[in-house]
Image (cartoon, rainbow, N blue to C red):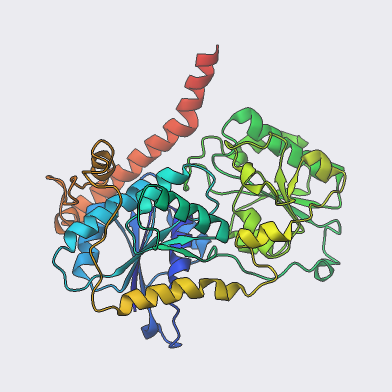
Amino acid sequence: MRVAVLADSDTRWKWGALTAHRLVPDRSGSASGRRLDGFLLRGRATPTARQLTEVGVRADALREVTGVEFVRAVDRERYDVIVLSLVGGAVQAMLHGLRHAWRGAARRPVVVTGYVGVVYEKLADGLLLRHGADVVLANSRHDAERFRDVYTGVGADADSVVECALPFLGGARYDEKARLGRKHPGGTVVFAVQPSVPDNRADRTYLLRRAVDHARRHPDREVVVKLRSKPGEHTTHIEELPYQKLIARFGDEVPANVRLAYGNMGEVLDTADLLVTVSSTAALESLHRSIPTAVLTDLGVREALGNHHFLGSGCLASWDQLDAGHLPEPNAEWLARQGVAADGPYETWFDAARERVAELAAAPALPPLAPFYTPVTAPGYLPGRLARYGFAPDGSPRPGAASEDQARAGTLRRVVRHTMREAARGAYRHGVQRVAPVIRRMGEL
């Protein structure tokens, strides 16, 4: 089985590649059982080599492409399954591009898409942009019901929605006794930060100070601030105010039992006795392992923060409560609806999706891709979504979109283009992280 995964950030590469492993398992015990080719969509969030290493999911081949280059590459190669792990607008563009490229083809690959984590905003917008894939994965029963409601609500086919779970849940179940005798007898508290939530300096500084104060109040504990990226790197969301820069201003106020950490979230959770976050998907990873998990209410329970998704979970708590020794008790019914299977057969949660993909891949022929958005249903919206990724309203490459051969021709040209691209990314990041905050502060004077 040959699988292609197209991703546009480090988090989406993690979801897409692990989803491919779940849907098309290598049962042969050899490298010949499944081939996974990775494609990284060129853009502001294209992951760096360090980010890819941190994710820890490897491919048999991996390269950076534009949208048009990807469509041409998978049209030329004979793939069985394509996983689109992208922002909604990019998924829609690829669906139309692939539909156009496969016109008249006797066979085509199965196209799969979904979400990388908790879906707490732009539900209808993101879902309708993903409509048209053969399989739209829902990470929980809760999401599957919502997804079907959205599709049927606009008169679109909802049969593509298949319930599964997040592909990166797993790891050792929490065992407090196994962690006795460590350097910090009070345990390890992991504060999982997010690049865009909250979105202002005052709130981010407040949360960081509370984490530092917690470490000061509990010198027998270790407080680990789990970072998403290094300054200058981009993730799925833009990080204007990196926590490592904010904590540098604390100077000697930071006690010795506070440390910053990068690395794979699963490895960090291996040492965690309490996971604290605003609304990160890491909370679901932690709950899956039965690690005590707190979703912070200090800044309110608000849609803008995403922590409203955890209403009914039993995990909502404040730093004051955690300082006093409170450990949240999760609600078992809520966990089951959210696809967190700490006590259940987690591996079986992918059976339905695996069977659906296998059935479609074995079919003599599949019908053309049929997105809900077309030049007829969304003439004022669709063309702009497609143009951003190099496609005309009918899904064909826009005039002037370079072919893959032209784009890759000449060693010197490749070096120059790569250098210019990195310089442009650096300028963009500088503007987001340095210039924009200054302009905002000047505007407040």
Of 65 and 390, which appears nearest the observer?
390
Of 159 and 330, which appears nearest the observer?
159
x, y (%) of residue 113?
Answer: 40, 60
Residue at the location (62% across, 59% down)? 337
If the image is split into quadrants, where does the C terminus sit?
top right
Which quadrant holds residue 12? Answer: bottom left
Of 21 and 157, which appears nearest the observer?
157
Q: Is residue 21 above or below residue 279?
A: below
Residue at the location (13% across, 45% down)? 400
x, y (%) of residue 84?
Answer: 36, 59
Any part of residue 233 in sight: no
x, y (%) of residue 395?
Answer: 19, 51
Q: Using residue 166 as the reference point, say whether residue 154 is left or right of it.
A: left
Residue at the location (38% across, 73% down)? 357
Of 295 and 193, which appears nearest the observer?
295
Q: Is residue 311 above or below residue 178?
A: above
x, y (%) of residue 167?
Answer: 53, 66
Any part of residue 56 in sight: yes
Q: Using residue 11 as the reference point, say whether residue 323 is left or right of it.
A: right
If the image is split into quadrants, where does the N terminus sit?
bottom left
Residue at the location (43% across, 88% down)? 28
Q: In this view, does 152 lie above or below 368?
A: above
